[in-house]
Image (tube, rainbow, N blue to C red):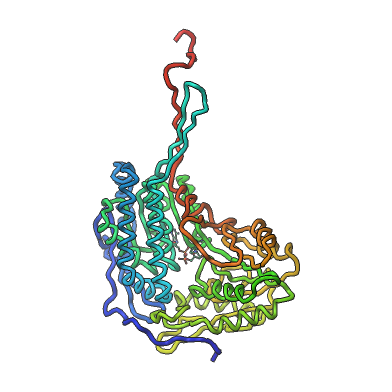
Amino acid sequence: MLDMTVITDAEIALPAEPVALQHFIDGTWVDSADGAVSERVSPSHGVVVSRAAQGGETETEAAITAARAAFDDGRWSRIPGKERAAVLLKVADLIEQHTERLAVLETLESGKPINQSRGEVGGAADLWRYAASLARTVHGDSLNTLGDDMVAMVLKEPIGVVSIITPWNFPFWILSQKLPFALAAGCTCVVKPSEMTPSTTALLAELMVEAGMPAGVCNIVLGYGMPVGSLMTSHADVDMVSFTGSTAVGKKISQIASGTLKKIALELGGKNAQVVFPDADLDAAADAVAFGVHFNVGQCCNSSSRVIVHKDIADAFTTKVVELSRRVAYGNPLNPDTQVGAIVTPEHQAKIDGYVQEAIAEGADVRLGGAPLEVEGVGSQFYQPTVVTRLTSSMRIVQEEVFGPVLSVLTFKTLDEAIALTNDSVYGLSAGGWSNDVHTCLAFARRAEAGTVWTNTWMDGYPEVAFGGMKQSGQGREIGRYGFEEFLEVKSVVMRVGRTRAPWVNGS
Ligand code: NAD
């Protein structure tokens, strides 16, 4: 048995009954026309957590029609920002009141630790509050320098009907990075959560009704990418798709959306590196590397699945990370002391292990872990904290998104080499640099090809700070003012003051 920290007991009882979920279309909860349902079995406890209506084209069409009508008649898009903000603030309050119920379902469906779910749901309320502030403060430009008889305005308008498609790894958080911002802008929405984690998105409908959101403004269809997500992307009545998920599906979304040239915003995969320079605070860096790779069992777009360490400190630093990784509390997600929970599906667990075994076959050295993990009384859908060395940058484990608690260690000698290794990826989501020299931090930050660069920290995020990816990690930005602007169209209004222009047609 690997010498590591494993938690087996639980403090929260398993639900007696699965939660029953319906679509929410035009203010009404409905089952699928064909009666189809799908069940989600908890990755950690093997119980059926939810039984959800499984949508088809009928429900998707109905949801898009409702969102289109709600947008076009102005019941949300043309009311004062103050009124939209009031509803969003009420939703935020209700999310806080219902945090425990939402968090338990999030944990049971995703396998993540309960304290993490509580943090994500509670933190999501702040995203709704920040978005509410934008609903009241958004403005365009006025141009008063065009001549005595001319004035122009650049107006910001809601883009229209937005399809929102989300993944399973941070279901409520990612929904809240998109939906309140789209709503704050005045858009109406059709939302599809991952088929694996539908509960918290479906339950949000209850909170939105209680908060006074008009019918048709936010519609939720439960189901799979095909046909629901696909129709949400191809439909001519949808003006924009905001998608978070894998790069492979992101490329499909891009292709399908091109049929109507609708706007797309894509938040995709990552293969993020933390670079440790020899003058860094090595204890703090090692802790951040352990956090970066084990958080959410590595099932995280921001996972720092690569660490690039200066050669002089590589052995000592790797030993530190190995020792810290042993002490991370893996195990029962329903125990508040657990830091790392279960893997989302058995197939994904096998995929993670496949990367590790392939690396071993190619000559890599596994310094810790490297195998699935069984947690007594909880189940076998876990994976050991794993640290792999003796790698080259071209190996699949270093290039591809493993999406597990698997750290690849590479080494460098010069800043140029560190930057080259960091950027040796098709992805460009995030990167981190560790040094006590501000010049090194700044040089790294300016040259790293990533949408977010952290220096001397990892994965700190704020509603105010834009997030998104370069290269194959995505298009557009989320949260912050830049993220909000994605949901706005720009319209220029040019006005002549009085009939001062010489006629174009002679004599008119
Ligand atoms: P996924 O791409 O398999 O699924 C994401 C969503 O797309 C789901 O709701 C799914 O049902 C839907 N979908 C699947 N096929 C579709 C299609 N043809 N048309 C429309 N919708 C379709 O991703 P996942 O496995 O749920 O999530 C993990 C991935 O998400 C990882 O690659 C991760 O890096 C990425 N991710 C990125 C960010 C970010 O902000 N950049 C955040 C979280 C997750």
Looking at the image, can residue 351 be seen?
Answer: no
Residue 60, quarter of picture? bottom left
Q: Position of residue 42 (x, y in %)?
A: 38, 77
Residue 313, quarter of picture? bottom right
Q: Position of residue 234 (x, y in %)?
A: 42, 50
Count every numbered label the image shows and give the total.
0
Residue for point 46% across, 27% down: 151
Please tell me whether residue 1 is drawn above or below residue 82 in the rendered image. Answer: below
> Which of the image's four quarters has the N terminus?
bottom right
> Which of the image's four quarters has the C terminus?
top left
Please tell me whether residue 183 is drawn above or below residue 434 in the rendered image. Answer: above
In the image, taking residue 83 as reference, residue 373 lies left or right, namely right
Q: Position of residue 34 (x, y in %)?
A: 27, 62
Residue for point 33% across, 77% down: 48
Residue for point 27% across, 77% down: 17
Please tell me whether residue 73 is drawn above or below residue 221 in the rendered image. Answer: above
Looking at the image, can residue 27 be seen?
Answer: yes
In the image, taking residue 331 as reference, residue 319 lies left or right, namely right
Residue 322, quarter of picture? bottom right
Residue for point 29% across, 67% down: 21
Extreme residue in the bottom direction:
1
In the image, taking residue 359 as reference, residue 2 lies left or right, namely left
